[in-house]
Image (cartoon, rainbow, N blue to C red):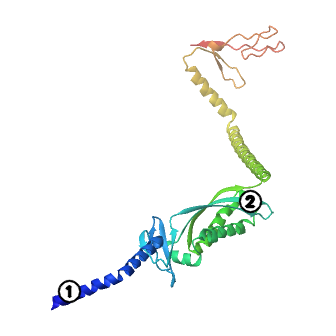
Amino acid sequence: MESNETASASTHLKHWLRRKLPWLIILFLLTALIFVFFWQRIIITVNPGEAAILFRRFSGTEIDKIYGEGIHIFSPLDKVYIYEVRKQVAYHEFDVITNKGLSVHLSLAIRYRPEYELLGILHQRIGPDYLTRVILPQIESVMRKQLGNYTAEQIYTNEAGLLTNAILTALDEVGRNYVEVEDIIIRSITLPPDIVTAIEDKLKQEQLMKSYEFRKKTAEEEAARLKIEAGGIKEYHAVINESLTESILLHRGIEATQELAKSPNAKVVVIGSGKSGLPIILNTDQMSPVTPPDGSASNASGAPADDDKKINPPSQTSSP
């Protein structure tokens, strides 16, 4: 009984397939055609360094789900947006008008990337072209506002770090738009050639003036040192002059004569010479006759003899 029912069901299925076969073939071909035509929207590959956001046709953007790297299958009615989440670099140039009306050309390099966790909100509120919609205009606006209050020279020389302050302000402003700007690098600052020449000449003169002031200060300090040294020498001589009496000088002379007398070298001692009566001890190796230009005789001290005065020649003794 059961085998008869099974055979009957199989027979009915075969008959149904025979009747529906053309429609089944058409449905299969239609499905295959749709798959071939929309396969790029059905099978999506997210490459390394990328992330995908899905926009559903009937419910909108999925802001709470981010599709990472790999193969994903979606409905052909939906649309997938792929973002690069690696660090990226954008080059941008623009002009800044200073407070004196001069134009300063800035060339920037901007390192940025979208915030991964906020990628859905970024797509919903700003879109894939967030670089040209948010980052570049915001940075340009902040830089112009910050630098427009200064002169071309102050910008060119980065006086008081004004360029650094402008960059920090721009980073803070851009960071509020679901993107992360890691750094803004100033590649070049271009001014009119005449302005650059004038600024460089002024800076050169300032450096020369600083060098002159340094040399002047050094000379003043050296003069002060010499003055102090001269004052010390003067005080030293004043103390010495006050302490040197005739008795002390006579005592020192006697001590020196005794020390010379103990020397083994040959010498000549003149007894009773000089105002103090101390002997004069001369080295015989260094003695030489002194003859005045007029041929007159000279005394032991080398002074010419005076005919009007008779001076008893001192007695001489030689000692080994």
Choose the circle earlier in sequence order: 2 or 1.
Answer: 1
Instruction: Check the picture and name the quadrant holding the C terminus.
Output: top right
Q: Is residue 303 visible?
A: yes
Side (left or right) of 181 relative to 239: left
> What residue lies at 73% left-to-right and 46% top-to-bottom?
211
Furthest toward the top, the residue is 295
> What residue lies at 35% left-to-right and 80% top-to-bottom?
21
Does residue 304 sit above or below 99 in this rendering? above
Find residue 165 and report its image quarter.
Answer: bottom right
Q: Position of residue 51 (x, y in %)?
A: 48, 70
Q: Position of residue 124 (x, y in %)?
A: 56, 78
Does residue 150 sit above or below 247 in this rendering? below
- Mark sitting on residue 196: none
Side (left or right) of 280 relative to 208: left
> What residue lies at 65% left-to-right and 34% top-to-bottom?
248
- Mark sitting on residue 104: 2
In the foreground, 230 or 249: 230
Amino acid type for the residue under numbered disc 1: Ala
Amino acid type for the residue under numbered disc 2: Val
Does residue 6 sit above or below 76 in this rendering? below
Q: For mark 1, give the secondary structure.
A: helix
Side (left or right) of 28 relative to 189: left
Find residue 177 and report its image quarter.
Answer: bottom right
In the foreground, 4 or 151: 4
Q: Is residue 67 visible?
A: no
Q: Position of residue 26 (x, y in %)?
A: 41, 78
Where does label 1 land, which residue? 7
Local packing at callout 1 (Cα closer than 10 Å; few below 14, some 14-19, many 20+) is: few
Furthest toward the bottom, the residue is 1
Q: Position of residue 123 (x, y in %)?
A: 55, 75
> What residue lies at 74% left-to-right and 14% top-to-bottom?
299
